């Protein structure tokens, strides 16, 4: 197979972790006889520094012309003082919208080798942990009307959270189809006891559930879901929720797996074009020090192989290589535990690539 990928290293540790993911993709290409070529593009703070905007039009064009997009991380305190619409994070929202990527898949898998890194009691995770958060990505409060105005107590900021039945059904269908291929359970997370948009969401999910009688369905308020993720995470299979709730819950789920440096993500639309990135941020405090964990980015590349390129066997080979290096005891600082071997970012990438 020949595939053309748009690569956005981004800010902070982004270039370091992207380099290791590309190293692994090239190992896949060599072993399986594929050809992957790349176009590097700017987004985030580095784009602001270079051209004065977080998402240049050239980057959008490069992504649309590619088979898929691999992204590192964007943002950092250097650009915190900029107006909201000029901050590095607007690049992510702009890319998701421009590419029509409405579904964000965030798997949370606790590897047996990392069980000591999990902060929960062993009784809560015994038997393993394997869940997926399906997050709606181009609606809700992150894309709603926003601004500042004069209120009861002076100047106030406001953000609007809205969901249509169409948007809820569209993301819900992704969750139900995924559950059919897993353990056949969907948990829809909302705040329908308070929010009107959640009531619209819940009604749409109930209607959709009728079309999937083979899949167990339940509703759960977001505050309860946050508690249940640390109290009994094994009860979950596929969670489906809106943009902001999914953003928060997936970060919580990452810590159950041992480190936020372990969680990949895939952002998908109607076709095969997707954007793949680790869920963690740019971590500028450790940039350039070789401390960053590249495994979430490498696992994101595995998701790219599976969902955008249709290379399930190759994706499984990458995931197996990650498991092998963890079982060997190799650890970056974020997942280090007694008796294991410390490695830097590059060494971890080398180890995974060598096992493809």
Image (cartoon, rainbow, N blue to C red):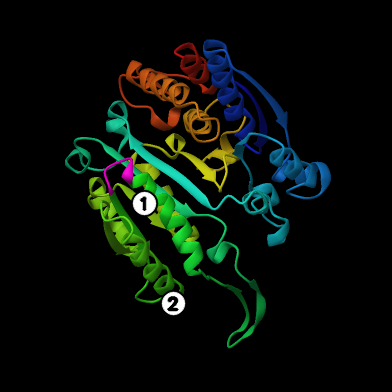
**Residue 13: horizontal and vertical position, in percent?**
60, 34
Examine the rendered structure and indicate whether residue 305 appears above or below residue 198: above
**Of all residues shown, which one is farthest toward the bottom?**
152
Quarter holding residue 63: top right
- Residue at position x 52%, y 20% from top? 349
Q: What element carries label 2?
A: helix
**Residue 281: horizontal and vertical position, in percent?**
55, 43
Give the label on residue 25, or none: none
> Dot 1: within a 10 Å radius of its alpha carbon, few (fewer than 14), some, or many (20 or more) residues?
many
- Residue at position x 44%, y 44% from top? 106
**Residue 121: horizontal and vertical position, in percent?**
21, 42
Whether residue 285 is in magenta: the answer is no
**Residue 322: horizontal and vertical position, in percent?**
41, 23
How far is mark 2 from mark 1, CA to CA? 23 Å
Examine the rendered structure and indicate whether residue 176 appears above or below residue 351: below
Q: What element carries label 1?
A: helix
**For mark 1, what is the residue?**
176
How would you classify the magenta stretch by its main secondary structure? loop
Side (left or right) of 297 relative to 10: left
Q: In which quarter of the image is the N terminus?
A: top right
Q: Is residue 248 visible?
A: no
**For mark 2, what is the residue?**
196
Q: Can residue 90 be seen in this view?
A: yes
Name the foreground residue: 193 vs 17: 193
**Of all residues shown, which one is farthest toward the right?**
51
Foreground disc of the pair 2, 1 = 1
Name the foreground residue: 225 vs 15: 225
Mark 1 and mark 2 in contact (Cβ < 8 Å)?
no
Q: Tell which circle, 2 or 1, labels the residue nearer the N-terminal end.
A: 1
User: Which range of residues does the magenta coloring cover?
Assistant: 180-184
- Residue at position x 73%, y 49% from top? 54
**Of all residues shown, which one is farthest toward the left?**
123
């Amino acid at each position: 197979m020949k595939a053309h990928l748009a690569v956005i290293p981004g800010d902070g540790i982004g270039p370091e972790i992207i380099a290791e993911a590309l190293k692994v993709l090239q190992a896949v290409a060599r072993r399986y006889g594929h050809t992957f070529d790349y176009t590097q593009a700017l987004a985030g703070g580095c784009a602001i520094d270079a051209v004065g905007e977080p998402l240049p039009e050239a980057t959008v064009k490069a992504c649309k012309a590619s088979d898929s997009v691999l992204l590192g991380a964007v943002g950092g305190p250097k650009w915190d003082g900029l107006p909201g619409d000029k901050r590095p994070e607007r690049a992510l929202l702009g890319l998701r919208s421009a590419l029509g990527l409405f579904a964000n898949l965030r798997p949370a898998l606790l590897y047996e080798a990392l069980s000591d890194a999990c902060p929960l009691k062993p009784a809560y995770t015994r038997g393993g942990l394997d869940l997926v958060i399906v997050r709606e990505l181009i609606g809700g409060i992150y894309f709603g009307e926003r601004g500042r105005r004069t209120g009861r107590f002076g100047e106030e900021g406001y953000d609007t959270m809205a969901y249509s039945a169409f948007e809820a059904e569209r993301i819900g269908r992704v969750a139900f189809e995924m559950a059919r291929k897993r353990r056949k359970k969907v948990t829809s997370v909302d705040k329908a006891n308070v929010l009107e948009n959640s009531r619209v969401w819940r009604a749409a999910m109930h209607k959709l559930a009728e079309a999937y009688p083979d899949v167990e369905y339940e509703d759960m308020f977001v505050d309860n879901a946050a508690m249940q993720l640390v109290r009994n995470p094994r009860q979950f299979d596929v969670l489906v929720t809106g943009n902001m709730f999914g953003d928060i819950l997936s970060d919580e789920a990452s810590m159950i797996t041992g480190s936020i440096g372990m969680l990949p993500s895939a952002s998908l639309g109607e076709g095969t074009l997707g954007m793949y990135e680790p869920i963690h941020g740019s971590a500028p405090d450790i940039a350039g020090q070789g401390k960053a964990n590249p495994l979430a980015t490498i696992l994101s590349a595995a998701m790219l192989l599976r969902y955008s390129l249709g290379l399930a066997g190759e994706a499984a080979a990458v995931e197996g290589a990650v498991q092998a290096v963890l079982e060997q005891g190799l650890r970056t600082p974020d997942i280090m535990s007694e008796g294991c071997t410390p490695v830097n970012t590059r060494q971890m990438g080398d180890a995974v690539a060598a096992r493809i």
